[in-house]
Image: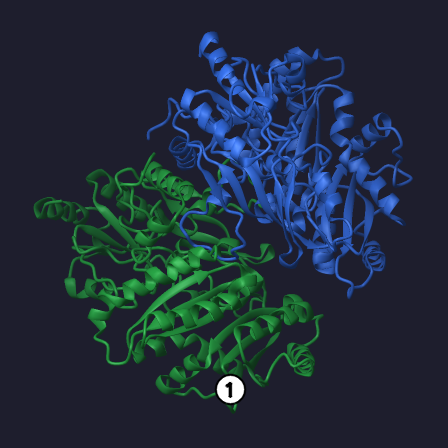
Chain colours: A blue, B green
Amino acid sequence: MTDEKLHRFVDQLRSSDLSPHIVTDQDAIAPWLTDWRGRFHGRSPVMVEPRSTEETAFLVRTVAEHKVAIVPQGGNSGMVGGATPDQAGDAVLLSMRRMNAIRQDLPEEHAIIAEAGVILQNLHEHLEGAGLRFPLTLGGKGSATIGGLVSTNAGGTQVLRHGTMRALVAGVEAVLPNGSVFDGLAALKKDNRGYDLNQLLVGAEGTLGIVTAARLRLCPAVVDRCVIWAGVETPSAARKLLLFLEREAGSAMEGFEIMPQHCIDNVLQHIPGTRAPLAGNHDWHCLVEIVRDDAGDMGSAQRAESIMARAMERGLINDAAMSASEAQAEAFWKIRDSIAEAERAEGPAVQHDISVPVADMARFIETVAPETEKRFPGSRAVAFGHMGDGNVHYHVTAPTNSDADQWYAGAAKDISQWVYDQVAAWNGSLSAEHGIGQLKRDELERLGDPARLFALRAVKKAFDPDQIMNPGKLINLASPGDST
Amino acid sequence: MTDEKLHRFVDQLRSSDLSPHIVTDQDAIAPWLTDWRGRFHGRSPVMVEPRSTEETAFLVRTVAEHKVAIVPQGGNSGMVGGATPDQAGDAVLLSMRRMNAIRQDLPEEHAIIAEAGVILQNLHEHLEGAGLRFPLTLGGKGSATIGGLVSTNAGGTQVLRHGTMRALVAGVEAVLPNGSVFDGLAALKKDNRGYDLNQLLVGAEGTLGIVTAARLRLCPAVVDRCVIWAGVETPSAARKLLLFLEREAGSAMEGFEIMPQHCIDNVLQHIPGTRAPLAGNHDWHCLVEIVRDDAGDMGSAQRAESIMARAMERGLINDAAMSASEAQAEAFWKIRDSIAEAERAEGPAVQHDISVPVADMARFIETVAPETEKRFPGSRAVAFGHMGDGNVHYHVTAPTNSDADQWYAGAAKDISQWVYDQVAAWNGSLSAEHGIGQLKRDELERLGDPARLFALRAVKKAFDPDQIMNPGKLINLASPGDST
């Protein structure tokens, strides 16, 4: 698109009803042109901040008419550059942050309808005292928006019991690329009118349409909870503990996270106010959340204590601590939630959000981590995260004193490719919960089987033949290997 | 397609590896050319019965090459003509019934991989004694196949607790229209590689590809169960009972069905070996399944008894019976499961599998049923089914002594159109669990909003531009109102 055409387009937006919600001041746009991890930098002449579904639909119709690209963005805390425009600078940045109303509380139906721009933490706070909760949380809850969480099918630390966003979204409202509004918000428990369009839009990363609101499933509020912090020797030992807890705690266990000692050291060093839960060092740490969400059940502390005593007896853990208060539970979680931030302070690292079959995860870490460090001398392989979901964040740090830019441009790419090859060999996924975005698009293409690539491309082409919806993310339409 | 071309195509199949699995004897094909309800009659020159995914893929590649249409079929017990070819007689009938292996038992992961042709009842029997069960059942379990259940996103009587097929399918294997095989059977709990292709194929009615196998979620086997049969006065009274039971029984309640007295009378008259659970007549009957699937819980009979006593005290039910044995539980369910068969014996009727928001179902029945009977004199409106899912089967019977063919061709169509108009006005769905098939395709087109129709058509066009996969079902590509 020529500069002149682009200016004419911006002028047209300015003269429309959207005018008050248009930002062209580059200083105001700038913070939103780099992704959270600082890996992707884009350009955009204009940021639009619609207040309603109607305004969003108007914008989409306008960009469709002019074949201008549009990049939707929520809290800008995604991990794969999915909300960052490219360097061409001819895409509209669509901020959904001002569409942040709770549209409807539906306590009898254990549901709530929230607009795309509602921040996760605000949703949690909104529900306080209502006897209900939205059972999804993650480190970025203070910025992540419902629209972004829906569009990336976000996971987090409670997937073990409650599933990812996909399981928690009962329906979405979205503006499709032709400007029509799909309304899936009605309260139908059963609806078999063809392909599941709600689920198709979940995890679509804004490439099929703009999610403007979602009907979310709620569950009973937590009456009390107890966090167990346990030290073990290996990922396999952690898995044994997990299997034991699954039998003993059943649905009272909402989260099971593992972290190596190295991550704990990093957090204690870089994050103010954190302290080690256990006295000594342990090669691996497990964080277990035990919850009571039904007044009739045993208290979570009591349950946790009895389970942990039995786990100790059986030699499943070396040492353990239990949270004695909500503040202490928060402090335990803060360590887990600060790993990424602490790592960023430590130096360059390349992150892989991967999954393998749940039963194989421990073996995967124990096999692939030493191989990685051997193959890339000076680097360190760190695996932490959602053991119970078969999903770890597999990070490889640069050798000490590496030049960041040089390392990212060179060795980091080799490392990633090698890691994804291992994941493929273990029948895993190169994206467990972060999505594809820009970061993994080419790797998905490289490792994806023909049927998957055919189907992804077919859907994208069908919805958005002009490639105006978040272009360059998830899947490219044109490909040399494309036989369709 | 000319007869000559068609014969050449069949000859080509005969000379391939598929040869032993090809049926051209019209007597052998005939039983599969009429749907279960006897409403749709089709023709087909050839029925193919592949034994493997590879054979299915070979068949799809061959039909794709010749642009021959293909109609997949499981147990042929669908309700909307979705598995019946049309009268043109130039489509291949693809029977998946011989692909009926259980591929893999995965008890540790509470999963099983079953091929498309596995009959539901056989799956249930296969799991007996394994401590696990597949928590979906329906009247047609003796013929319905996994492939058909997946492709129609079937529901049934346990959706209240366990959801429809969509919630129970962890992944599918399917042959896509270009002959490639999509393999979603891997045991990944989290996988964010773009659009959810597994879910896209669930409920697609064979219009996007042929489901050849599915990975199904299992849950703990039932330790014991108790079926409560309760008489109430109105659907609203049934809803009050449901809300009470949701609070009191929680997840121990797996099913809540309602039936009017008229349905019970029909069953007792037409189905041998059935007897009334309650002594007197009641306008409405509720069937409640209380289950214990955890050895630590209270026994289901004890739980049912205590709950029913409290419900009686509160005046929520007029009379009730509890199953005293598994045989009696089966006998209660047999009445419910025989309603459709008994109705068929009674005379012409037009069926509507509809849903409205759960909270509105009782009011819907109480409002729309008398209106229906008033508007169409001599007909009777009968609503029964899954109250807890907002999903009833809303049947309207023909006036006594109606000529069936004439009535189906005339009044029945007017009735259906009117019923669907009411459903739309109540923000409901014209298909809750049966799908669209041939029966509801035009009504979906008439009542569907533009965004939904755009998206359905876009996906279909993208996957199957030549319309060879189950053509004429679910959605037509060409439409006068199509603006895409």
Residue A2 in which image quadrant: top left
Q: Is residue A120 above or below residue B52?
A: above
Q: Give the camera-side residue of A203 and B299.
A: A203
Q: State left or right for residue B411 relative to residue B135.
A: left
Q: Residue at x 30, y 59 (%)?
A: B81
Looking at the image, can residue B429 be seen? no
Residue B331: horizontal and vertical position, in percent? 48, 82
Q: Residue at x 74, y 23 (%)?
A: A344
Q: Residue at x 83, y 42 (%)?
A: A330
Q: Is residue B93 above or below residue A426?
A: below
Q: Residue at x 67, y 18 (%)?
A: A31
Q: Give the camera-side residue of B240 and A403.
A: B240
Q: Which amino acid type is shown beneath numbered disc 1?
A: Pro
Dot 1: within a 10 Å radius of its alpha carbon, few (fewer than 14), some, or many (20 or more) residues?
many
Q: State left or right for residue A391 relative to residue B62.
A: right
Q: Is residue A152 above or below residue A255?
A: above
Residue B192: horizontal and vertical position, in percent? 55, 37
Q: Quadrant of the C terminus of chain B?
A: top left
Residue B228: horizontal and vertical position, in percent? 58, 80
Q: Mark 1 — on which chain does it sit?
A: B
Residue that badge 1 annotates:
B277
Looking at the image, can residue A108 be seen? yes
Q: Residue furthest right?
A: A279
Q: Is residue B481 above or below residue B402?
A: above
Mark 1, secondary structure of its residue: loop
Q: Quadrant of the N terminus of chain B?
A: top left
